Image (cartoon, grey):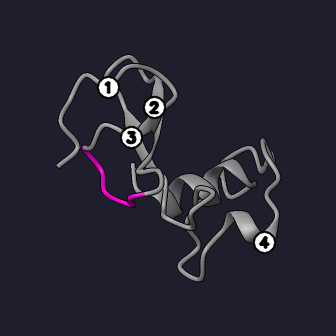
Amino acid sequence: MENKVFYEQITGNNLQKIEYMEFTSKDINANGEIVDSWQSPIKIITNQDLSIIFVSADKDKKFGTKDDISSEPLPINLN
């Protein structure tokens, strides 16, 4: 799922008009994307079972390296 679309939907731009999460200005970049502590956009992966995995590229700002941080084990290569 595109990061910006996810952000818009989770903050109230959805059919129910429900705001599920709040973010501070430091959590969102100029493109409207959710970012990590290093100001890199978070990768958002949706699975067939509708579960969501959030991935940070971490300090090196490159996805697919050993320092990536994810909300659960990654089943795919992010490169």
Residue identified by numbered label 4: 25
Q: Are marks 2 and 1 in contact (CB under 8 Å)?
A: yes
Looking at the rendering, the stretch of residues picked out in magenta corresponds to 60-64
Front-most of 14 and 66?
A: 66
- Which of disc 1 and disc 2 is earlier in sequence? 2
State which mark lies toward you, 1 or 3: 3
**Category of crowding for the residue at label 3, using alpha-carbon neighbours closer than 10 angstroms: few (below 14), some (14–19), many (at least 20):** some
Q: Nearer the viewer, mark 3 or mark 4?
A: 3
Residue type marked 4: Ser
**Around disc 1, counting alpha carbons within 10 Å, would you say few (fewer than 14), some (14 to 19), or many (20 or more)?**
some
Residue underneath mark 2: 53
**Which of the two discs, 4 and 1, labels the residue nearer the N terminus?**
4
Q: Is residue 56 left or right of residue 67?
A: right
Q: Residue at x 39, y 40 (%)?
A: 67
The residue drawn where x is 38% and y is 38% is 45
Observer-nearest of 24 and 70: 70
Sequence-first tag of 1 and 3: 3
Spatial CA distance of label 4 from label 1 is 28 Å
The residue singled out by tag 1 in the image is 74
| Real-space Cα separation, disc 3 to disc 2, in angstroms | 16 Å
Distance from disc 3 to disc 4, alpha carbons, whole Å, reads 25 Å
Q: Earlier in the sequence, mark 3 or mark 4?
A: 4
